Image: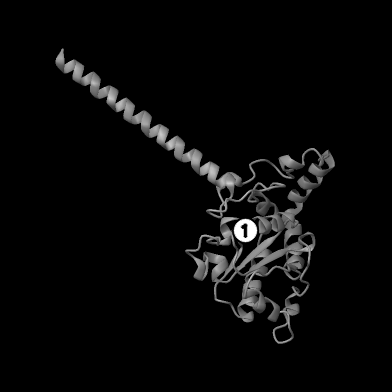
Amino acid sequence: MSEGNLIKVGSPYVPDELKDTVTLTSLDHAIDALGELLSPVISPVANLARSNSVWPLTFGTSCCAIEMMCVGMSAFDISRFGSEVFRATPRQADMILTAGTITRKMAPALITLYEQMPEPKYVIAMGACTITGGMFNDSYSVVQGVDRIIPVDVYLPGCPPRPEAILDALLKLQQKIRTENYHERKKRTYNQRAVRYVDYDTGKLVDDLVEEARQEADAVLAGGATIALKSEEKQAEASEKKD
């Protein structure tokens, strides 16, 4: 994710596409300010509760999903950690376990699911194909790392990772949740939109590509201006020598 997509304004924040239907009142801002003031007191208690009830979204795109199913069975029993409630809707989920290859055709759907989840939300990138593209690293149709399109909290390598590794990744995520400050996390939230477009050739957000192109154009223009200035200086020196 590029720095340009981070929210630069104060929270709470409403995306431009939703401003016609969503209105924030002074009460919303007052509640947010009160929450920030009491955050040092409330965060440890709230984080402990949230870390022991991380509900995953039911999401699997390839063979890693088989291992994700196994971790819910009695042999491994993910319910010991409070995460057995796999939800069928992102509105009720806290975490996405991206179990499997993410193709460029699937990327917009994954981004939509991620943005429909309520904050705070987390992502565990499961498997080599999800993290780097894996055996499909040079494929034209596979996203070369899910962190190109959504923020990732924990990386879980393997092809595929065993259920024990999933539990280990969940424990690391729980530790991260227990030690974070929610209002500090909100400051790092990227600017979400009701509709977000993804470039199928690169797997990157179109906004990121536009920003990169703008920076490259500015660099080229700045370089051209420098070259033109040096050329003018050389011409001036040459004319002085002739005189």
Q: Nearer the viewer, residue 49 or 115?
A: 115
In the displayed structure, does residue 28 sit left or right of residue 210?
right
Measured as percent of width and height from the top left, residue 29 is found at 79, 42
The residue located at (51%, 60%) in the rendering is 140
**Looking at the image, which residue is at 72% across and 40% down?**
16
Question: For this rendering, which residue is in front, 38 or 164?
Answer: 164
Describe residue 134's horizontal placement relative to residue 163 as left or right: left
Q: Residues within 10 Å of mark 1 (few under 14, many from 20)?
A: some
Classify mark 1: helix, strand or loop. Answer: loop
Task: Name the residue at the left extreme.
Answer: 242
Vertical comparison of 180 with 84: above or below? above
Q: Locate residue 125: give its quadrant.
A: bottom right
Q: How is the image coloured?
A: one colour
Most foreground residue, 210 or 91: 210
In the image, is residue 217 above or below residue 119? above
* Count of numbered marks: 1
x and y percentages locating residue 134 in the rendered image = 51, 69
| Residue indicated by mark 1 | 105
Q: Is residue 127 above or below residue 206?
A: below
Where residue 133 appears, as percent x and y from the top left, is 53, 65
Name the kind of residue labelled 1 in the image: Lys
Position of residue 28 measured from the top left corner of the image (x, y, whole percent): 81, 44
Residue extending farthest bottom = 75
Image point (60%, 55%), residue name: 149
Q: Is the C terminus in the top left, top right, bottom left or bottom right quadrant?
A: top left
Quadrant of res 130:
bottom right
Front residue of this view, candidates 71 and 24: 71
